Image (tube, rainbow, N blue to C red):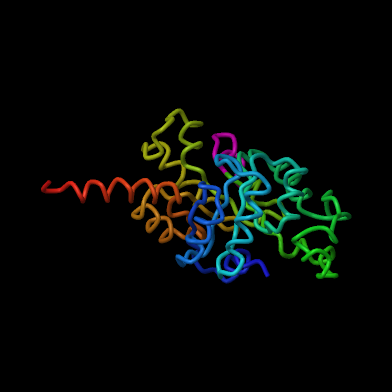
Amino acid sequence: MNLFKQGLAEGRPLLGLWQALATPYTAEICAGAGYDWLLFDGEHAPNTLQTLLGQLQAVSAYPVAPVARVPVGDPSIIKQYLDIGCATLLVPMVETADQARRLVAATRFPPHGVRGVASSTSRASRFGADVNYVKTAREAVCLLVQIESAAALGVIEEIAAVEGVDGLFIGPADLAASLGHLGDPRHPDVQAAINDAIGRILATGKAAGIFALDAADARARLAAGVAFVSLGTDIGLLAAGARRLLADSLQGA
């Protein structure tokens, strides 16, 4: 069962937390915190297949949906992520419908796609114990694509129309850079583009997601109908907590 895909189908908001520390220990701590999903980042965190595997194993006992972001939409990488049990994938920098179709094909076994078959040696099939895995795998896969460039904004409807794309996730930081406002995702032009993108995604009937800038932004996005929202990062929580503890301890000293 894919908890993330099930949550989308039920229409309930899914609240997530980015995982960039790349260790099973902190992943397990976060898994017990009550979030709906955890994003294990293969693009901007020092993750390898081995570290991802360890984190997936660490959180498997908890009712939280693991999502993994691949570093790039390469079919060989997607195949490996799926084989170790990452059934929900987030792919960065998707800018055309053709690219989205190739990504869908990379997540499907033939004749529906081009994914290589290694069912008896994959964790996803419980090492062959799930004898129906190759026949049912595509039903459990959830493919999320990132909208984070001016080019992607122009073809949202075409990308959303691709069968097999389950959700479109807006990345404010890269989108801001693409729109000429590097480091300023709160710029009015960027925010206007995000608001427009969310409305257009929802109009297609596909799920919209976003990395919230703060708690207030998260509440606003959820109120606007965004289905899955990242509320922050494990690194951000650790850094903010460490600074706050020191500052609180020095008060009145």
Q: In this view, does 154 lie above or below 233?
A: above
Say left or right for 10 vs 109.
Answer: left
Q: Where is residue 237 in the image (x, y as percent from the top left)?
A: 39, 51
Residue furthest front in the image = 253
**Residue lying farthest to the top in this orientation:** 180
Seen in the image, is 79 located left or right of residue 147?
A: right
The answer to which of 127 and 11 lies nearer the viewer is 127
Q: How many numbered badges does the structure rendering display?
A: 0
Residue located 75% across and 49% down the image: 80
Residue 135 placement: quadrant: bottom right
**Image spot of residue 229 (x, y percent):** 48, 56
Residue that sits furthest to the right in the current view: 111
Residue in the image at 63% along x and 61% along y = 57
User: Percent from the top left, x then y, of residue 233?
Assistant: 45, 50
Quarter assignment of residue 74: top right
Along the viewing direction, whichever of 87 and 160 lies nearer the viewer:
87
In the rendered view, does 228 fall on the left or right side of 91? left
Which residue is found at the position 68% from the left and 59% from the top? 87
Q: Which residue is drawn at 55% across and 42% down?
A: 45
**Magenta residues, start to end:** 147-156
Q: Where 167 sits versus 176, above or below?
A: below
Asked which quadrant contains residue 96, the reply is: top right
Q: Is residue 64 rendered magenta in the image?
A: no
Quarter holding the N terminus is: bottom right
Residue 196 location, x and y as percent?
47, 46
